[in-house]
Structures are given as structure tokens and as C-alpha cells.
Amino acid sequence: MKKLWGGRFTKTAAQWVDDFGASIHFDQQLVEEDIEGSIAHVTMLGECGILPKEDVETIKKGLTKLLEKAKNGELSFSVAYEDIHLNIEKMLIDEIGPVGGKLHTGRSRNDQVATDMHLYLRKRVMEIIELIRQLQRVLVEKAEQHIETLIPGYTHLQRAQPISFAHHLMAYVWMFERDRERFTESLKRINKSPLGAGALAGTTFPIDRHLTAKLLSFDSIYENSLDAVSDRDFIIEFLSHSSMLMMHLSRFCEELILWSSEEFKFIEIDDTFATGSSIMPQKKNPDMAELIRGKTGRVYGHLIALLTVMKGLPLAYNKDMQEDKEGMFDTVQTVIGSLKIFAGMIETMTVRVDVMEKATKQDFSNATELADYLAKKGVPFREAHEIVGKLVLTCLERGIFLMDLPLDVYRQASPLFEEDIYEALDPHNAVNRRTSAGGTGFTEVKKAIEKVKQMLEA
């Protein structure tokens, strides 16, 4: 087939070469954005008197018809026309005749593809922001149910201090809030129009870039035509923010996987988010959590890939930059799917309150309470720390816990210990006393939940 750019060529490439160079296999996902951008472009050409009004109306009607077909999945794409832009242009010419060839006046595929990706990412990032909000709402709802449910808090994956389970869940709410903020802030750079920059140097036609930006609801235009067609920072930034989000999801998935094991038994993942074994009938595997954890590496890979593609490219456009799309598309799909799956897992999981609370009473995570108890009575904290450490050693030697030690043993360690020491050691009291701002005390957790609920309603 004759190439739309083939006037100066005397030879045609072999089919396998065309296949290797074509991007239509994946950039057909930009079909709606490509047509929307073209409608804005031809509208501007008419407003600026570059094309006759009758040609503009004919082209717009043709594009509108193609857009309807695209939304209904009725368009067929060909490798012979390489990419989404030339495919649409060929379809338009077939639909309305040679006048369709006037559409490309005053623009290049370089500014066209950049525009398409800005439009595409704007839609997807806004969708991701809303999905993060939905996940936060699910977490807050679950946290409200478990304000006074206790769970061991960990450092180094060793039991450290008892905390409210709601407090643990709310930690992730704030992580996801930072993710939401990052995606929201990135819209400033996504919502910028490269259309009209041409191949790299602008155009001699008296176009109005601000008009096309307005028609496409962009906030502003790129001020430099070279930058407009060569910038992929907005995609790299999206991949970076997505990597951070996936890292947070992966950390949480790791905890869900641990908590659902026989060793912990803190939660049970709903059957709809688990699978069985082909050989072991008793197995219930947390596969969705494991998949999200695994797909995190996939998103990291897309970020590193595009950074590597861009690191040595001279201005302006280079064919290497065709590699910017597949990773972007895959990351969008991965992030959206992961957020939906994760929200479902949290919403339907069973929390084994009794197992969690029993765990807080069969460890030494209340040891800090003893040190604080002595410190409040004037014992230097380092000295109190040593006294409590020796008491823990005594318990280990006897095979008991701090609550089981007789009062006379405490008094031998320090005459400052009194009968109220057992009240101080109670995990519920230990948690509830932590009323410093942002702490795990029940009153503080309630405040945090109310604050987030108001934030989510804003």
C-alpha cells in the first residue's frame, strides 16, 4: 500500500520491517483522543481562515462519524498505516474523499501524538485519583469498626508495642493520600497542550494554539516547540507516582499475606480473592494479594525502561520515543486493576479480633509500659530500660509473660513498682494511654478517622 509519507521514496520496506516499526498494535488505544484532537485542530483551522468553512464542516462530520464508530468498536486498523494517526487519516479520506488530506495542515505526527498522550493520561489519572479515594473510604469504614481492636505492632517484624488495628489501617490511608496528592499535582504538567508545535519548529500557518488548548480543556500550552514534541516528563512522572502507589499496595499486600497465614491467623481473605491448590485440598492461597505484590515490579520496570530510553536522546523527536506508550498503557491497566482488587479485598476480609487481641497478651510488647512507669516516677529512662530488660529475661527463663510475674519479683527489681503495675501492663490501657498527636490511643484514632472523613468529603 502507498505510504501517506512516501513521496520521496523509491523502495518499499518488507512486511516484517513494517511490522517491527509499526505502533498501531498498541497505540490504537489512543483512537478517541486522536480524533478529539483532530476535531479541535480542524476547528481552529477554520476559525483562523486557514481552511474554508465548507471543508472544515466536511472534515468534522467525517471525524465525528469515525469517533462514533470508535466508541462502538467498529474501526479496523492496519499495520500498513503504521500508527493511529495515519490510520485515522486514511479512514477519513476513505470516508469523505481527498478533502480529508487537508486535516494535517499546520501540524505533525510529533505534536499530534504528544497531544493524544496528554489527553489520554489526563483521563486515566483522574480515574486513578477517584479509585484511590474509594480505597481510602473502604479503609476508613473498616477502621471505624476496629478502633478498640488490638493488634501487635511490629518493628523488624518482631512484636514491638500493642496498637489499635484501626491505627494500623489509617497509616495506609495517609500513604494513599500522599499518592493522591502526587497524582493530582501532576495534572498541572499533564494538562498542557503541545498541539501546534509541529514537527519541532512550529509552523508558517497562522494557527492559534491557545484556541486548540481551550477546545481541548488544557490549562496552557508548551511555550517552546522543541520541548513540546520531545517532552515525556509527564509520562515518567506518572510512572514514578504509579511505582510509589504500587509500593504502598505491595507493602499492605505483604501484611495481608502474613496475617492470613496459619502462623498469624489475624484475618481471612474472602474466597472471591483467593484460590486453591491443584494438589493440596486444604490450601487457600492469597493469590490476588500476591499478584499485586508481583505486578509492582512490572510497574517499576516500565519506569526504568522509559528513563533509559530518554536519557541519551537529542532534541527533538526520535523514533525511540515510540517506546513510551506500551509501558504507560500497561501501567494504567495494572494500577487501575490493583486498586479495584485491593479495595475489594479489604472490604470483604474477615478480621479475627480474638486472635489479634490474644497475641497482644502473649508477648512482651507491653515492656515499654514498665520502662515508662518507672520513668514517670523519676527513674532515668536508660536505667528503667535496663531494669525492665532484666525482668523480661526473668520471664523468658520462667516461660511466662510480664503480666504473670508476682509483685514481689517486681519490687525486688525496683521498690517503685506497686500493685497498679498490672493495670499499666494491660494492652488496652497501654494503647489507650498513647494520646500524643497521631498516636494509637483510641481518642486520637477517632480524631484521625473524623479528619479523614471530612477530607474525603471535600
Image (spheres, rainbow, N blue to C red):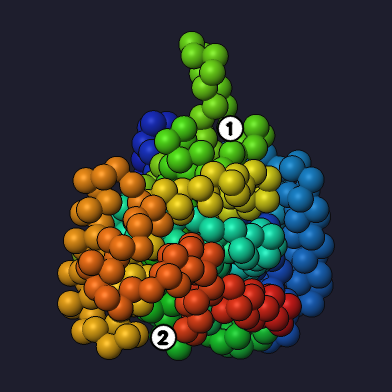
Q: Is residue 439 left or right of residue 317?
A: right
**Residue bearing mark 1:** 274
Question: Where residue 193 sits: x, y (%)?
Answer: 55, 78
Q: Quadrant of the C terminus?
A: bottom right
In the depicted structure, whether residue 424 falls above or below residue 162: below
Q: Residue at x 79, y 60 (%)?
A: 64
Q: Nearer the viewer, residue 285 or 263?
A: 263
Residue at the (19%, 61%) spot, across then down: 390
Nearest the viewer among 331 and 362 is: 362
Q: Disc 2 residue type?
A: Asn
Q: What's the amino acid at mark 1?
A: Ala
Judged left or right of residue 388, residue 440 is: right
Residue at image location 65% in from the left, 32% down from the top = 271
- In the rendered image, which residue does mark 2 sit on? 224
Q: Give the number of marks.
A: 2
Helix, strand or loop at disc 2?
loop
Is 365 placed above or below 430 here? Answer: above
| Mark 1 or 2, nearer chain start | 2
Q: Is residue 237 visible?
A: no
Residue at the (67%, 84%) spot, across then down: 214
Tag 1–tag 2 contact (CB < 8 Å)? no
Q: Determine the CA span between mark 1 and mark 2.
A: 51 Å
Point out residue 91 in the picture as x, y percentages from the top left corner: 68, 49
Q: Using the image, tell me which numbered label, if any, was put on residue 49.
A: none
Q: Nearer the viewer, mark 1 or mark 2?
A: 1
